[in-house]
């Protein structure tokens, strides 16, 4: 196995033991990027000299006998919508191509502090708005498994890179599925943490409005659940610059090994391929000693409407002029389609959504006290044909009910890979979404590891040029 094929936990252990140097790992990862990135356009900015310097620093610290960080020498990527000193925080926009950060976002600072080596910046659609990844600045990102399907979005570059072996961990953000859906589409493990788990703030830009403050989070994509544990712990180190950050323990108390299987939440027309993956995940949990009941879950449609209202209120108030200036046809089309389904809310609608949020969260918390894991579709469909939202947006938004509905409550959600299936687009990754109580990502990791251990291992995809 090539060193760039190994997961981050293995790489960190090998570097700590002196079996390989951080420089060798970084050089191998950069070579892998050279070999495959041209076919997928996942990494859109890089500084090889800085990456190699960070790796050399890890090796020097080890040579001096210093304690190494938990991710020392592990190659990672960061998404272009978070500040990384010396790089533009483009958010997929031409109008921000010169917005060069002077300081790191806390999540980037935490990764570096843990010893991770940032090997590149990954692509996102304009305004990080879609479940597909194309923009007028950086171009089109492809899925390394199958170019006919989306790599997901908005963290499509992160997931595509990680699936192709460009780094062990890909940083992503999620306000409406932007970690969970790319993980699903690219056959990875990916977690949207609880609101407040991972500190985040972009010094380069004004603070975001209340919708994003309540719903947007940073988290990792990886090829193993062990790497999700490792990288989330590194990302979650407290930082006072984010007032939403909560220094909650990463491991909680005992819990009942009980899960709820919800195949068609609120009448969602779940595709048979997706249903098969959900039932497969449930069967693996049962084999691991869990009790699984097939039941209805708490509301998702009404939370999804509130989420869209808060999202649109922020878009219109904070980004309307930028949409005009950017003039990205994909983003303009998607925003117009969102407006058709959810008109721009007035102040009372925003306040109503904020009030309703508390009740929805109460219902979910009570349900999760009985079922600490809920098995839901990531999407009603297998990974979409690429750019489907430009021709069939209502179909896309309906299929993504669980992606949109959950962030309103700030709950954690994990996309776990279950295997591959055959759709109209050919061979496609499949998986299940696991939802758990706030600040109990450890429960989701336990369940995901049980599912992971009883299924096919994630293998790196080599795209066809």
Image (spheres, helix red, strand yellow):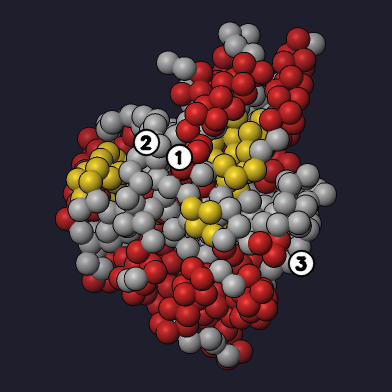
Looking at the image, residue 328 lies above or below residue 2: below
Looking at the image, residue 360 lies above or below residue 465: below
Q: Which residue is mark 2?
A: 464
Label 2 CA crowd tier, 10 Å (few <14, some 14–19, many 20+): few
Task: Please report whichever mark, 2 or 3, sits nearer to the chain's N-terminal start.
Answer: 3
Residue 341 visible to the viewer: yes
The residue depicted at 27 percent of the width and 58 percent of the height is 381
Residue 248 x/y as whole percent: 62, 48
* Quarter of the rendering occupied by the C terminus: top left
* Quarter of the rendering occupied by the N terminus: top left
Q: Which mark is residue 206?
A: 3
Displayed quadrant of residue 94: bottom right
Secondary structure type for disc 1: helix
Q: Which residue is mark 1?
A: 39
- Whether pointer 2 and pointer 3 mark residues with C-beta atoms closer than 8 Å, the reply is no
Residue 241 x/y as whole percent: 78, 54
Comparing labels 3 and 1, the label whose residue is closer to the camera: 1
Task: Please report whichever mark, 3 or 1, sits nearer to the chain's N-terminal start.
Answer: 1
């Amino acid at each position: 196995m090539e060193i760039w094929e190994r997961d981050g936990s293995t790489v960190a252990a090998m570097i700590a033991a002196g079996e390989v140097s951080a420089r060798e790992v970084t050089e191998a990862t950069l070579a892998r990027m050279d070999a495959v990135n041209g076919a997928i356009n996942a990494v859109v900015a890089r500084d090889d000299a800085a990456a190699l310097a960070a790796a050399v620093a890890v090796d020097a610290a080890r040579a001096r006998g210093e304690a190494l960080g938990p991710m020392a020498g592990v190659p990672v990527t960061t998404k272009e919508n978070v500040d990384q000193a010396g790089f533009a925080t483009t958010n997929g926009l031409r109008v921000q191509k010169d917005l060069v950060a002077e300081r790191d976002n806390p999540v980037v600072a935490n990764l570096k502090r843990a010893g991770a080596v940032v090997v590149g910046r990954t692509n996102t659609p304009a305004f990080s708005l879609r479940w597909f990844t194309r923009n007028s600045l950086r171009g089109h990102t492809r899925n390394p498994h199958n170019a006919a399907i989306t790599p997901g979005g908005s963290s499509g570059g992160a997931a595509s890179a990680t699936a192709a072996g460009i780094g062990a961990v890909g940083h992503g953000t999620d306000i409406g599925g932007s970690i969970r859906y790319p993980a699903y589409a690219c056959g990875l493990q990916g977690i949207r943490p609880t609101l407040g788990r991972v500190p985040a703030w972009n010094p380069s830009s004004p603070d975001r409005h209340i919708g994003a403050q309540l719903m947007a989070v940073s988290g990792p994509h990886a090829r193993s659940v062990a790497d999700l544990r490792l990288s989330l712990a590194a990302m979650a180190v407290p930082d006072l610059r984010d007032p939403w950050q909560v220094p909650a323990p990463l491991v909680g108390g005992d819990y009942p090994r009980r899960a709820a299987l919800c195949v068609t939440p609120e009448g969602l027309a779940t595709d048979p391929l997706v249903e098969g993956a959900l039932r497969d995940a449930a069967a693996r949990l049962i084999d691991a000693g869990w009790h699984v009941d097939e039941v209805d879950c708490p509301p998702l449609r009404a939370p999804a409407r509130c989420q869209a209202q808060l999202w649109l209120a922020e878009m219109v108030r904070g980004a309307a002029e930028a949409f005009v200036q950017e003039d990205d046809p994909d983003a303009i089309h998607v925003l117009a389609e969102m407006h058709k389904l959810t008109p721009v809310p007035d102040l009372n609608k925003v306040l109503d959504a904020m009030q309703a949020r508390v009740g929805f969260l109460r219902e979910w918390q009570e349900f999760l006290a009985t079922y600490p894991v809920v098995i839901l579709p990531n999407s009603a469909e297998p990974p979409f044909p690429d750019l489907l939202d430009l021709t069939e947006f209502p179909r896309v938004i309906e299929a993504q009910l669980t992606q949109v509905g959950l962030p309103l409550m700030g709950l954690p959600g994990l996309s776990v890979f279950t295997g591959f299936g055959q759709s109209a687009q050919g061979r496609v990754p499949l998986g299940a979404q696991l939802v758990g109580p706030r600040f109990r990502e450890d429960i989701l990791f336990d369940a995901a590891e049980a599912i992971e251990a009883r299924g096919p291992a994630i293998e790196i995809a080599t795209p066809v040029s």
